[in-house]
Image (cartoon, grey):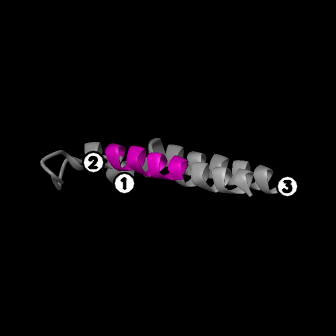
């Protein structure tokens, strides 16, 4: 398997993991109002944290992909 294919596979698995955090079985962990974090309910914080993790993951995979194309 080529390196680019591995990176694509890892990105796909990472995206599925983030998606799993936002649907029923795992989301029930974060689906509550208390405690309040930064003045927002925990469930909203959970969603924002997942979005931020996805953003950081996209940047990470982007920089890995750019570094390998330049060399």
Q: Which quadrant of the rendered structure holds the C terminus?
A: bottom right
Earlier residue among tags 3 and 1? 3
Q: Residues within 10 Å of mark 1 (few under 14, many from 20)?
A: few
Q: In which image quadrant can residue 40 be found? A: top left
**Tag 3 near tag 1, CB within 8 Å:** no
- Dot 2: element: helix
Earlier residue among tags 2 and 3? 3
Q: In which image quadrant can residue 29 be found? A: bottom left
Q: Which quadrant of the rendered structure holds the N terminus?
A: bottom right
Which region is colored magenta?
Answer: 47-59
**Tag 1 near tag 2, CB within 8 Å:** no
Q: Residues within 10 Å of mark 2 (few under 14, many from 20)?
A: some
Q: How far across and how far down the image is residue 64, in percent? A: 63, 56
- Given this view, does label 3 or label 1 mark the residue nearer the observer? 3
Earlier residue among tags 1 and 2? 1
Residue indicated by mark 3: 2
Secondary structure mainly formed by the magenta segment = helix
Q: Is residue 21 left or right of residue 49?
A: right
Residue indicated by mark 1: 29
Q: How far across and how far down the image is residue 26, in percent? A: 45, 51
> Is 42 or 51 nearer to us in this picture?
51
Q: In which image quadrant can residue 43 be found? A: top left
Q: How far across and how far down the image is residue 28, in percent? A: 38, 49
Give the CA separation, mark 2 to mark 3: 38 Å
- Dot 1: element: helix
Q: Which mark is residue 45?
A: 2
Q: Which mark is residue 62?
A: none
Residue projecting furthest to the front: 70
Residue 6 highlighted magenta (yes or no):
no
- Given this view, does label 2 or label 3 mark the residue nearer the observer? 3
Q: How far across and how far down the image is residue 23, in percent? A: 47, 41
């Amino acid at each position: 398997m080529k390196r680019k294919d591995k990176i694509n596979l890892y990105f796909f698995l990472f995206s599925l993991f983030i998606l799993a955090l936002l649907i029923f079985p795992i989301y029930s962990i974060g689906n509550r109002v208390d405690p309040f974090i930064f003045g927002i309910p925990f469930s909203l914080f959970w969603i924002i944290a997942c979005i931020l993790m996805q953003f950081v993951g996209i940047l990470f995979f982007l920089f890995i992909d750019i570094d390998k194309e330049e060399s």
